[in-house]
Amino acid sequence: MGAQMRVYRQRIRSVQATKKITRAMELIAASRVVKARQRVAESGPYTHALTTALSALATYSNEEHPLTSEPEVVRRAAVLIISSDRGLAGGYSSSVIKESEQLIQRLHDEGKEVVVYLAGRKVISFYQFRHREFAAEWSGFSDAPQFSHAQEIGERIMRDFDTHYDEGGHDEVHIVYTRFKSMVTQEPRVLRLVPMEVVEEADGATVKDSDAVLPLYSFEPSLEEVLDQLLPQYITHRIYTCLLGAAASELAARQRAMKSATDNADALIKTYTRLANQARQAEITQEISEIVGGADALASA
Amino acid sequence: MSQLQVELVAADRRVWEGEASSVRCRTTAGELGVLPGHTPLLGILVSGDVVIHAADGDRRATVGNGFLSVDHDRVTIVADTVDVADSGR
């Protein structure tokens, strides 16, 4: 076997091994994305119940709650960036990071200080590598977030929100995450969490009966206390739905990236097989011409 | 007698849905029982047990922080965490 052919064979083998891996990852992502989308759908009833209750509250109350009213001056803004823990998902993490960079730039231009909260190993290493500061980080759950993770993040962010500016508190909160539109489109999005507009269309869940007349609720123990309890719950839930959407997007992005990697591996194997065949043919041709040349030389001697 | 339409919802799933004759739970103001025809109410739940007297037996669940909304015989119990202690079948 010629040296050239050996090199091609080796390459074909290594590409085949890579293809097996990418193919497996594609299948795993495909099966997980179904689960992730199901979980997005399962969080729908809660979103609906919470939104209905809050719309009722918003209708009856003229309360100025710190979570809903615009602060007169925003000096510091918090940004929560949700990315993935692992790579090999195409442009998933980098497009979230790019979107967040734009947001941070815009906030800086508006004269606000920015504190960042990071979720997902990819964005954490992005910040650590550049020696940038961040307030807190969470990782290890990007493809299957639990409600407790959202609670943890929500508690931390709300605690800092309640802190005074001079002690490091912030006046508004933004989330950068990836919205799951369909299996083929996921778009990075910025959502302003606090101060919030309560009545808005939630991701993945259509708010039914929004035209229906809201019941004349009595509140127990009191309207203010109900509001105090519900708003943080709503925020935690918003973070949770963002995490779920991001997880579904990550898996869909990974599935697509791995599919094209598998296709590319196929194309490479084809090319290398052609080249290897060509090399083999060239070798045979050369051998024949050597034999014929040798015979000729003997005959003419 | 009319029945209550009860929905028990956790943050990550709908736990139970169905008809019931009454619901008992704990709010910040104390123990609360809901029968059909109850006035519209929005109450804060404290961690504790919720008992639903469903048509096919009692259902008990332990809920975390949440709230309860009653409106036109439709009861929605919403909590961060719901543990179904005993299906009561």
Image (cartoon, rainbow, N blue to C red):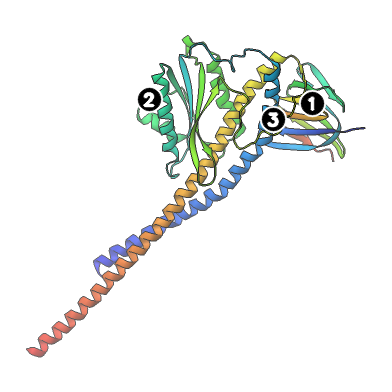
Residue A133: x and y in percent read 40, 23
Q: How far separated are the C-alphas under marks 2 and 3?
A: 44 Å
Residue A223: x and y in percent read 72, 15
Does residue B65 appear in the picture of this structure? no
Which residue is disc 3 drawn over?
A: A210
Residue positioned most to the front: A211
Q: What type is the residue that disc 3 sits on?
A: Ser
Q: How far separated are the C-alphas under marks 1 and 2?
A: 49 Å
Tell me which chain the residue with mark 3 is part of: A
Give the residue drawn at x 55%, y 14%. Answer: A162
Q: Is residue A132 above or below residue A61?
A: below
SS at badge 3: loop
Q: How far separated are the C-alphas under marks 3 and 1?
A: 17 Å
Q: What type is the residue that disc 1 sits on?
A: Val
Q: Is residue A223 above or below residue A260?
A: above
Nearest the viewer among B21 and A179 is: A179
Work out whether disc 2 and disc 3 sit on a shared chain: yes
Q: Is residue A288 above or below residue A127?
A: below
Of tags 1 and 2, the one toward the viewer is 1
SS at badge 1: strand
Q: Is residue A191 above or below residue A92?
A: above
Does residue A66 appear in the picture of this structure? yes
Of tags 3 and 1, the one toward the viewer is 3
Nearest the viewer among A85 and A164 is: A164
Residue A190: x and y in percent read 49, 29
Which residue is disc 1 drawn over?
A: B70
Identify the image quadrant of the N terminus of chain A.
bottom left
Which residue is disc 2 drawn over?
A: A132
Tell me which chain the residue with mark 2 is part of: A
